[in-house]
Amino acid sequence: MDSFSSKWQAFFVKKLLNWNHSSNFRSMPWKFEKDPYKIWLSEIMLQQTRVEQGLTYYLKFIEAFPTVTDLANAPEKKVFKMWEGLGYYSRCKNLLTTAKTISNESNGVFPNTHAEILSLTGVGPYTAAAIASFAFDLPYAVVDGNVMRVLSRFFGIEIPIDTTQGKKQIAHLAQELLPTHQSASFNQAIMDFGATICKPKNPICLDCVMQKNCIAYNQQLVDVLPLKSKKLIKKQRWFFYITAKYKNQYYFRNRTAKDIWQNLHEFILIEKSSRSSADTIINSAEWKKVIDVPFELLEVSNPINQQLTHQTITGTFITIQLKAPLQTNMYAPITKKQIQQLAFPKIISSNLNWLINL
DNA sequence: AACTCGGGGGA
DNA sequence: TCCCCAGAGTT
């Protein structure tokens, strides 16, 4: 565990803080922020999310909900609508849970110890360390994708970072490196350094202030580290969405199953595990079960692919005009005005305009 | 320990 | 296409 010489560790910390003080850090609205609520909000939004992508959402949320109590008291539907497009929607649900906990049980006062922060729903080791160090100057080292990459390269760690052992070793090393009285600066610096210099692809080693003692650089392992042991397996799914209109209303439902897009809304869905034609779908028993009234077929879209991390969705939209309201209660009729308040997955929101000509 | 949860951007 | 992004919760 302590196989790295303290000399190299001192070098790393000194060079990193120096690099940071030379105004190389990234400029972001939550930098130097001391309000734990704002730090928490930004950290949740940035989980597995690029800073540039999360930025507009953060600004929008802070304006709409200046305090944790404002967020706790907001209608859930409105919060999900504002989160629409950011992905990983369980974050939004957990965000609301924690906002209500703090607002109701702590009178809106954010917890100020590492253990309490870590116990919040949606707050794991990374986020707890980030809030503790940035808001309260507590000595906890953050470990995110940047930190794992930077440390595995500089110290030449060859244990895969997607294993328990690998994560444990990096976390231990990061905590050991952390200068106790400069935890916020160190944590921000190492992430900015990873994002701008020690990048995943084409890192800027020629400009790197620690090149001299970087094991990956000296042993030509920069393109190899960090190691990962697992390969991603993608599942293919075929979604047939039925845009069913009756008297200026369209049928939707909220996704509640243990699956993607929980708490988002969707049109009537018939899913297939293999490629299928729209004709087959329209004549299937499943179709007759949900489209239980006479209808007129208006349009069948071309298939549209959406890439997710673990699956590829091929979506086809089938537009029909109902001659009577559906008898099933699996889907609810929604007016155009109401539709605009609902949150949808991207494959629906990006096609909503032409589907129901808003 | 393995799986699953989105959407976007870069190579 | 594939990989990665200021990770966390569930199984």
Image: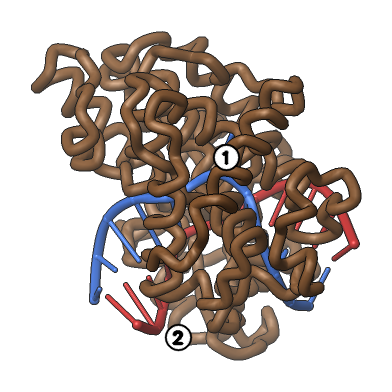
Chain colours: A brown, B red, C blue
Say which residue appears at 74% left-offset and 51% top-offset.
A198
Q: Quadrant of residue A113?
A: top left
Instruction: Give A317 or A256, whichever is nearer the viewer.
Output: A256
Instruction: Give A38 or A298, whichever is nearer the viewer.
Output: A38
Q: Is residue A235 left or right of residue A173?
A: right
Say which residue appears at 67% left-offset and 37% top-offset.
A15
Q: Position of residue A343 (x, y in %)?
A: 50, 40
Q: Position of residue A159 (x, y in %)?
A: 51, 77
Instruction: Give A15 or A262, whichever is nearer the viewer.
Output: A15
Q: Are the residues under marks 2 and 1 on the same chain?
A: yes
Q: Quick one: quadrant of the C terminus of chain A?
A: top right
Instruction: Give A193 or A207, whichever is nearer the viewer.
Output: A207
Tag 2 secondary structure: helix
Q: Is residue A233 visible?
A: no
Cα separation, mark 2 vs mark 1, equals: 65 Å
Q: Quadrant of residue A296?
A: bottom right
Say which residue appears at 36% left-offset and 22% top-offset.
A137
Does the CB distance between marks 2 and 1 fall below 8 Å? no
Residue A279 shows which numbered tag?
none
Q: Chain of mark 1?
A: A
Circle 1 packing at 10 Å, graded few (<14), some (14-19), many (20+), is some
In the displayed structure, A212 sits above or below A313; it is above
Circle 2 packing at 10 Å, graded few (<14), some (14-19), many (20+), is few
In the displayed structure, A41 sits above or below B4; it is above
Q: Amino acid at mark 1?
A: Val
The residue pinned by badge 2 equals A285
Q: Quick one: quadrant of the N terminus of chain A?
A: bottom left
Instruction: Give the number of the mark in front: 2 or 1.
Output: 1
The residue pinned by badge 1 equals A13
Q: Position of residue A204 (x, y in %)?
A: 85, 50
Say which residue appears at 46% left-offset and 45% top-offset.
A177
Tag 1 secondary structure: helix
